[in-house]
Image: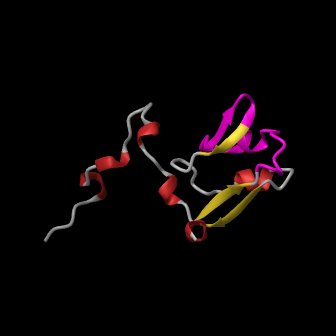
Amino acid sequence: MTLKGWNEVPMAGLVLDAGNAAEYHTGDWRTERPVWDEEKCKHCMQCWITCPDTAIQVKDKKMIGIDFDYCKGCGICADECPFDAIDMIEEDLEAE
């Protein structure tokens, strides 16, 4: 068996067409998940501003939840929340 060199290996699914990110649900990459405490939330939108995956759901200038189809569990929202309204927990614990 002869191994292929780096320039002979096909790109396969590594190249994505522009504008199709909505088709790829990347939330299953998570090891931790944010848990939002609505009572602590003051809707300052720091989580929304800093979320790299636009997973913070907003309606009428208020946070209404987290889109777990796209949240990768990075924890930036929890780190940036000045009101400690978002905690990170292990992904498996949420199912319990």
User: So how many labels did they put on this image?
Assistant: 0
Q: Main secondary structure of the magenta part?
A: loop
Q: How is the image coloured?
A: secondary structure
Picture coordinates of residue 17 (x, y %)?
38, 34
Q: Quadrant of residue 95?
A: bottom right
Q: Determine the residue located farthest toward the top in the rendered image.
A: 60
Q: Would residue 58 be seen by someone viewing this image from the given angle?
A: yes
Against 66, residue 96 (above or below) is below
**Quarter occupied by the N terminus:** bottom left
Whether residue 91 sits left or right of residue 87 in the image: it is: left
Q: Determine the residue located farthest toward the left in the rendered image.
A: 1
Picture coordinates of residue 60 (x, y %)?
72, 28
Q: Residue at x 26, y 50 (%)?
A: 10
Q: Residue at x 61, y 44 (%)?
A: 55
Against 62, residue 67 (above or below) is below
| Residues rendered magenta in the picture | 38-62
Q: Residue at x 26, y 54 (%)?
A: 9
Picture coordinates of residue 44 (x, y %)?
82, 39
Q: Is residue 57 magenta?
A: yes
Whether residue 36 sits left or right of residue 21 in the image: it is: right
Against 22, residue 31 (above or below) is below
Q: Residue at x 30, y 57 (%)?
A: 6
Q: Is residue 12 magenta?
A: no
Picture coordinates of residue 37 (x, y %)?
76, 54
Q: Quadrant of residue 58?
A: top right
Q: Would residue 11 be seen by someone viewing this image from the given angle?
A: no
Residues 16 and 87: in front is 87
**Quarter occupied by the C terminus:** bottom right
